[in-house]
């Protein structure tokens, strides 16, 4: 499906998709997270939501692998993520089923609402502190709803990031767990979408190629870190994302 869409589209549309991926990579390079939050509304202006989710699956994996492996002890980190992963798996199955069954306009409305919700929650995220006895049930719950958002809009991260922060993680520990979670969830998303009748392994190859502009954007963004206040940049981007979500809802109706 994805490769058919890109094959019949004009070169200007393909260029716009590439630019969208570069911009999304730029955000990840500057603040370390948030690539799909920017990429989805930009891509949805040129291709449908389902194809956008498929296109983002491989960049989500490859752009997070270096951070997921950084510092070693990846197996131990994976075990710490188990509550989230246990919740994410059924949530992602449900989210993908919903995405594949949706009409294009309904998908735009849902994706728009998700974008506004995720953007708003990330922008106004409260500083929570979990007690150790609540880590397991809270991790499963946040993982489940994160999985649904991942299946519907390729955005399984933001809710889980709030949970990781509430566990008390920060710095490299947060980045490692967040990146490892994104690698696992994006890998499962790619498998589920490819297993459907709407996508195939050629679409996976196109998605792998989409990693290149994302990496280019990340490279530029990493060199801009010292010139832009990350929090200011993040807030401006999230406000734009909320506006883009509202525009998606408007077009859906």
Image (cartoon, grey):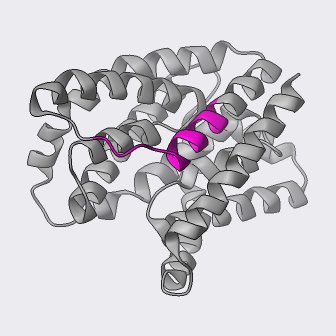
Residue in the picture at 35% in, 46% down: 127
x%, y% of residue 193?
53, 28
x%, y% of residue 17?
75, 56
Image quadrant in which you'd find residue 32: bottom left
Closer to the camera, 196 or 69? 69
Left or right relative to 234: residue 244: right
The number of numbered badges drawn on the structure is 0
Left or right relative to 243: residue 203: left
Q: Is residue 159 above or below residue 138?
A: below
The secondary structure that most of the magenta stretch takes on is: helix
Asked if the stretch drawn in magenta spans residue 117, the answer is yes
Closer to the camera, 106 or 49? 106
Residue in the picture at 58% in, 69% down: 232
Q: Is residue 24 above or below residue 108?
A: below
Q: Is residue 27 above or below residue 61?
A: below
Left or right relative to 87: residue 122: right
Q: Is residue 96 above or below residue 75?
A: above
Q: Quadrant of the C terminus?
A: top right
x%, y% of residue 112?
72, 32
Image quadrant in which you'd find residue 99: top right
Image quadrant in which you'd find residue 145: top left
Q: Is residue 205 visible?
A: no
Closer to the camera, 167 or 81? 167
Left or right relative to 190: residue 164: left
Region in magenta: 114-128
Asked if the stretch drawn in magenta spans residue 142, the answer is no
x%, y% of residue 55?
61, 44
Residue in the picture at 33% in, 58% down: 65
Residue in the picture at 60% in, 34% down: 117
């Amino acid at each position: 499906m994805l490769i058919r869409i890109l094959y019949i589209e004009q070169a200007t549309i393909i260029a716009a998709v590439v630019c969208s991926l570069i911009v999304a990579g730029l955000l990840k390079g500057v603040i370390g997270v948030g690539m799909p939050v920017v990429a989805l509304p930009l891509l949805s202006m040129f291709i449908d939501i389902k194809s956008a989710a498929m296109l983002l699956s491989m960049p989500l994996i490859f752009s997070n692998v270096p951070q997921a492996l950084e510092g070693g002890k990846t197996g131990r980190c994976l075990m710490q993520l188990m509550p989230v992963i246990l919740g994410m798996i059924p949530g992602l199955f449900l989210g993908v089923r919903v995405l594949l069954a949706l009409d294009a306009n309904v998908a735009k409305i849902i994706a728009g609402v998700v974008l506004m919700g995720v953007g708003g929650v990330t922008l106004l995220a409260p500083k929570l502190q979990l007690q150790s006895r609540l880590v397991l049930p809270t991790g499963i719950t946040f993982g489940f709803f994160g999985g649904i958002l991942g299946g519907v809009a390729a955005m399984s991260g933001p809710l889980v990031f709030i949970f990781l922060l509430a566990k008390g993680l920060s710095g490299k520990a947060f980045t490692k767990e967040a990146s490892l979670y994104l690698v696992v969830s994006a890998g499962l998303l790619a498998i589920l979408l490819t297993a459907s009748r709407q996508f195939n392994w050629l679409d996976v190859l196109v998605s792998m190629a989409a990693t290149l502009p994302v990496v280019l954007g990340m490279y530029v963004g990493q060199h801009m870190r010292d010139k832009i206040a990350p929090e200011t940049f993040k807030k401006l981007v999230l406000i734009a994302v909320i506006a883009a979500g509202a525009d998606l809802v408007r077009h859906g109706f």
